Image (cartoon, rainbow, N blue to C red):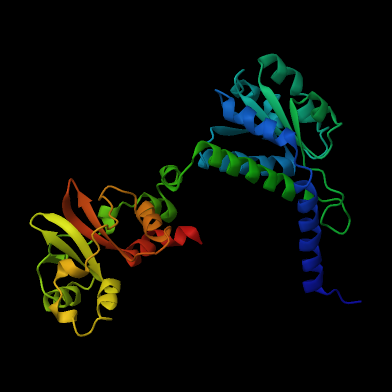
Amino acid sequence: MELDIIKFARDIFSSEIAELLSVRDKISEEFERAIRMILETKGKVVVTGIGKSGLIGKKIAATLVSTGTLAVFMNSAEGVHGDLGMIAGEDVVLAVSNSGNTDEIVSLLPSIKKIGARIIAMTGNANSSLGKGADCVLNTGVRKEGDPLNLAPMSSTTTALVMGDAIAAILMKLKGFRPDNFALYHPGGSLGKRLLMKVKDVMHSGSAIPFCDVGSNMERVLLTMTEKRLGAVCVMDGETMAGIITEGDVRRALKQKEKFFSFAAGDIMTADFTRTGSDSMAIDALDLMENRENQISVLPVIDDGKVVGMVRVHDLVRVVGETRK
């Protein structure tokens, strides 16, 4: 009988998703204890494992490092041959083993305890040697693996991976980890470059800034808005910005057709306007424009009371919007 490859692939997905949901429902106070241990340690997180669990451990350590938690990976087999020296008494060891009886990991436990480091077990067997020897246990046990023989680590490695992601994500939240922090640890990538971008890197400045006086007539306002093509005009009262006129302000004023051209800029401007500074992070400026009851599409950039630029939502989305996908 010919194998229905597409159906079989979907069955594998369904099987692993089911195991993930099962492990999710096992999350208990032990998980919170593990988070507090990592959060409160003055040392680092040493992730250890071997084989497929070791590969998962490497990824967990890499995720922790890139999201603000000091971590290293130690292959359990190398640990018994000298690498155990990287563990200090103030560290937390996150040991990953589905069976919990992996010889290389179990043989490390007495030395780790003697060093004084605390141990978090990520295992599918809480009653294993690792589970019994740990300070807390994260249960990643699965009923069956994804493969048809129920032998190859598939569902078990998936649940361990997601458990590691949950740890990293919660630590990020508790530490107030921000996009600019993430960028600091990823300066070479396009993501990091976008997240490190400041308003001054994308704003329109100098002669590109649209200005008018509070007493300017509507013809002048419209001509300036059309010429500068930024969708707004900064309304000045001497050297001070008194307000802003956006395309939305113009549309609202046009509802009074018979009076429109008798208005001055000061009559239709928004005096209580939102602003940003040139050294603000571009992603923060984008949040300022989007996370409000009425979204805005342009921001004046003001430093020390002086208008130094204008930035549009289009400019910001171009450099940081991709990070939200």
Q: Is residue 225 above or below residue 81?
A: below
Q: Nearer the viewer, residue 304 or 116?
A: 304
Q: Locate the N terminus and report the quarter of the image it occupies.
A: bottom right
Residue at screen point 79% across, 27% down: 106
Q: Is residue 153 visible?
A: no
List the single residue furthest toward the right: 1
Q: Nearer the viewer, residue 75 or 126?
A: 126
List the single residue furthest toward the top: 114
Name the image quarter holding residue 288: bottom left
User: Left or right: 22 with respect to 251?
Assistant: right
List the single residue furthest toward the bottom: 258
State the image coordinates of residue 130 (x, y, percent, origin top left).
80, 29
Q: Is residue 64 above or below residue 15?
A: above
State the image coordinates of residue 144 (x, y, percent, origin top left).
86, 52
Q: Nearer the viewer, residue 134 or 301?
A: 301
Q: Is residue 163 visible?
A: yes
State the image coordinates of residue 316 (x, y, percent, origin top left).
35, 61
Name the image quarter holding residue 88: top right
Name the image quarter holding residue 49: top right
Residue at screen point 66% across, 16% down: 116
User: Left or right: 186 with respect to 146?
Assistant: left
Q: Is residue 275 above or below residue 10?
A: above
Residue at screen point 79% across, 24% down: 133
Residue at screen point 15% across, 75% down: 263
Q: Report how many numbered discs are placed on residues in the image.
A: 0
State the image coordinates of residue 31 (x, y, percent, origin top left).
71, 36
